[in-house]
Image: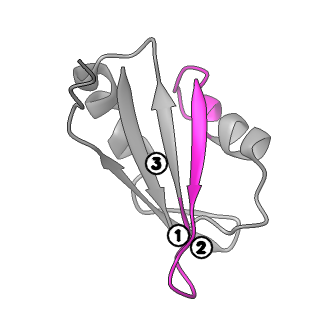
Amino acid sequence: MADLMLGNVEESVSDEEIGEFLVRYGFPQFSTIRRIPGAGSRPAALVTFDDVTPDGLRNLQPRVHNLFWKGRTITALLLPERDES
């Protein structure tokens, strides 16, 4: 499992649109998306991929980091692995 934090995603963008955006740039289908409200202008989406290793996601992350999409520059940060034991 690996997590990608997409920053500066407009709140009105649907989860389906985020999924289509990521697939367009070579990402697999996401497992879940959790919205994180911004303090005003920079809301984010935490995208979890159950079938991707952190190394696999690390190779894909540069494809969308600092990409201009839907009128905003998107940031993409790989989050450290979580220990869910």
At label 1, the amino acid type is Asn
Numbered tag placed on residue 8 in the rendering: 1
Is residue 81 rendered to the left or right of residue 11? left
Disc 3 packing (10 Å; few <14; some 14–19; many ≥20): many
Q: What residue sits right under mark 3 in the picture? A: 64
Which of pointers 1 and 2 lies earlier in the amino acid sequence?
Answer: 1
Q: Position of residue 74 (x, y in %)?
A: 50, 63
- Classify the position of the N terminus by image quarter: top left
| Front residue of this view, candidates 85 and 41 | 85
Is residue 70 rendered to the left or right of residue 83? right
Disc 2 packing (10 Å; few <14; some 14–19; many ≥20): some
Rounded to the nearest angstrom, the CA distance separating label 3 from label 2 is: 12 Å
At label 2, the amino acid type is Arg
Which of pointers 3 and 2 lies earlier in the amino acid sequence?
Answer: 3
Q: What's drawn in magenta, residue-wise?
A: 22-44
Is the C-beta separation of discs 1 and 2 under 8 Å? yes
Callout 3 secondary element:
loop
Q: Most prominent secondary structure in the magenta stretch?
A: loop
* Residue drawn at (76%, 45%) of the image: 17
Q: What residue sits right under mark 2 in the picture? A: 72
Rounded to the nearest angstrom, the CA distance separating label 3 from label 1 is: 12 Å
